[in-house]
Amino acid sequence: MGQGILKVDVRTADNALPVEGADVTVSEVGGRRLYRLKANADGQTEPVSLPAPDSSTTMRPGGAAYATYTVAVAKDGYVTETVVGAEILDGISHTQPVFLRPVTADGNGSETVVVPDSALKQDPPTGQQPRPARLSARTLGDVIIPQKITVHLGTPQNAYAKNISVSFPYYVKNVAASEIYATWPQPSLEANIFAIISLALNRVYTEWYRSQGYPFDITNSTKTDQYFKEGQTIPDNISQIADRIFNRYIRRIGHKEPLFSSYCDGSTVTCPGMSQWGTVNLANSGYTAMNILRYYFGNNIEIAQTDRIGGVLTSFPGGTLSQGSEGASVKVMQTYLNRIAANFPQIPQGEPDGIYGPKTAAAVRAFQRINNLPQNGVIDAATWNRINYIYLAVTKLAELGSEGQRIGIGAEPPKAVVSQGSKGANVVQVQFLLKAIGAFYNTVPQVIEDGTYGPATASAVRAFQRQFGLNADGVVGPATWRKLYSVYQSLNIKQPEDGTPGYPGTPLKAGSKGSDVELVQTLLNAVSAEYPSIPRVIVDGVYGPTTKAQVTEFQRLFGLTTDGVVGPATWNALMNAYYYNESGVISPPVSAPPAYPGYSLRQGSVGEGVRVLQAYLNRAPFGAGLREDGIFGPATKAAVVAAQTKLGLVPDGIAGPKTWGGIVG
């Protein structure tokens, strides 16, 4: 008999905020209690040791493999969650994620999740066929890592099976823990996780189920997709691999789409794709992960990477950050860690100065410990990606109260009935409420607050209705309005009292007019003094093409959807940028320098490129004191010559690529 390690991580439904003080018990399934634990300020318990079958049983088909336990989590104000069947492997550290949600006025005070056996211990379904490697006629333009993926817990035809929306990295970890054993050799684990990622991204890229009218991205049926188990325990080594490579996937050389990397266990079921048990034998024979993948899928495959990660604000710079590193990437990570520390108090905060010193390394180690990453104080790809995901989650949750205040959610819901095809302020309210509730109920997918009641909003409404026992017709009538308000109020999201202008209730976009547009133009003009790539406009209260360009650039800088529309999220970000800092503005999550315009700027040039150049010449270390009028006159030329001299460039007064890069950064 061996021993495995377990700790419990208690958070809200989207894996963002910790739930401090939760009472946790670990018991034998149907038997005696073994441990009584308490979640700390980061939502985590101390690790405990539990008996498990010897790891040798996981190296052959049909072995005993793992032990199972019951984990129960209780906290005042939350639904008590019991997980029956938490899986423990010998010699492996595990994390049992438990996602708590608030108790509603008429809600159930407890819930039990029974975790089925992992795929390798189950009998294959009768008539199981290899997963179909087909492309839908409908595909996305680019390979994008979704912020969340919606999983159907059943076959596609089972309309009564539950849908659950989870973050993409968590999905990958869950499937890996459900499909394979964490005790397998590293190359085997990596090869299997690459296949899991690629298969899932193929479903997303081809919109395989969405294009057929299904309200989900993938199923957990091994007849067609891959296994996902609600309540699955996550081995830490699988978690670390997934955090490092979740945005990398297999594709055929010369192709864009992720490979539909079909696989089966290779023992009870065989298929044309990869054999899971076969990967163990190959790894033990010295094969690397790439060797294994090429053995099964052919030599014409490669590992591709996408930096288009839905909702994640920056992509990994390519090299690790550690003590001694300096620059913008370090400052971004310091800023993100400070914000995360507001919700995870064991992470020490420091000044975001762009210098990676001992304090930053200590903050990184604390973050890594909380997130089950190697505690080396170095920001590699896995740590970078995880910081981005957690930052996104905590900032979105922090915005919920302020946006709720601004869109005017009062004590009583609207009386209007809204449904697919509706537009306007009531639709924005529905979308906001779904977003807030989806942070605590992962069966409710979050939607974009664009004021248009499209298929995604209708699907989210139906998911909400199913979750709370309403008629799932996708229509927000009196009963659904009341339940939306009731559930939202149970979340007890703090409302700010900052006195900033309230969101007008409907999105501002091309064609809009009035005082709200005038306010947006005024504030963006002010913010552009700090971020010169944001163009200035005439404040006339008319939302024309120049205002749309102004808004779009602001959205790009602040990591928002670049649609040129001022919805609640953009409005909130603009209010933060102008009002919430002693200097008048705050730094955006990412502030990439403006791109070189593509041609040299010289005396006589005019336009936006000249204005941006003038704005940067006015900054330190140049301090030119120019009028930012977009006209390249003698004063601007003299300032360029002075800057070139300071930078060690030829002082010809012409802003070519090198001079632009030296001045703008």
Image (tube, rainbow, N blue to C red):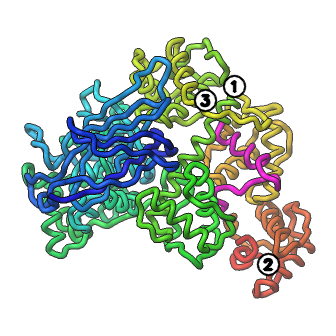
**Looking at the image, is mark 3 or mark 1 nearer the viewer?**
1
* Tag 1: amino acid: Gly
**Quadrant (top left/top right/bottom left/bottom right) for the N terminus:** bottom left
* Tag 3: amino acid: Gly
Horizontal placement of 378 versus 302: left or right?
right
In terms of sequence position, does the residue under pointer 3 or pointer 2 come before the other? Answer: 3
Residue 259 in view: no
Q: CA distance from mark 3 to mark 2?
A: 47 Å
Classify mark 3: residues with Cα within 10 Å, few (<14), some (14-19) or many (20+).
Answer: many
Q: Quadrant of residue 568?
A: top right
Question: Is 264 a magenta residue?
Answer: no
Q: CA distance from mark 2 to mark 1?
A: 52 Å
Residue at image location 26% in from the left, 69% down from the top: 290
In terms of sequence position, does the residue under pointer 2 or pointer 1 come before the other? Answer: 1
Residue 308 in view: yes
Q: Quadrant of residue 472?
A: top left
Relative depth, front residue between 467 and 278: 467
Horizontal placement of 512 versus 606: left or right?
left
Horizontal placement of 178 versus 25: left or right?
left
Residue at image location 24% in from the left, 51% down from the top: 88
Q: Which residues are magenta?
A: 568-592
- Residue located beneath label 1 in the image: 408
- Residue located beneath label 3 in the image: 451
Question: Is 571 a magenta residue?
Answer: yes
Residue 476's x, y, as percent? Answer: 51, 18
Q: CA distance from mark 3 to mark 1?
A: 14 Å
- Residue located beneath label 2 in the image: 654
Classify mark 1: residues with Cα within 10 Å, few (<14), some (14-19) or many (20+).
Answer: some
Q: Do the residues bearing badges 3 and 2 touch, measured as CB atoms within 8 Å?
A: no
Q: Do the residues bearing badges 3 and 1 touch, measured as CB atoms within 8 Å?
A: no
Residue 583's x, y, as percent? Answer: 82, 56
Residue at image location 47% in from the left, 69% down from the top: 380
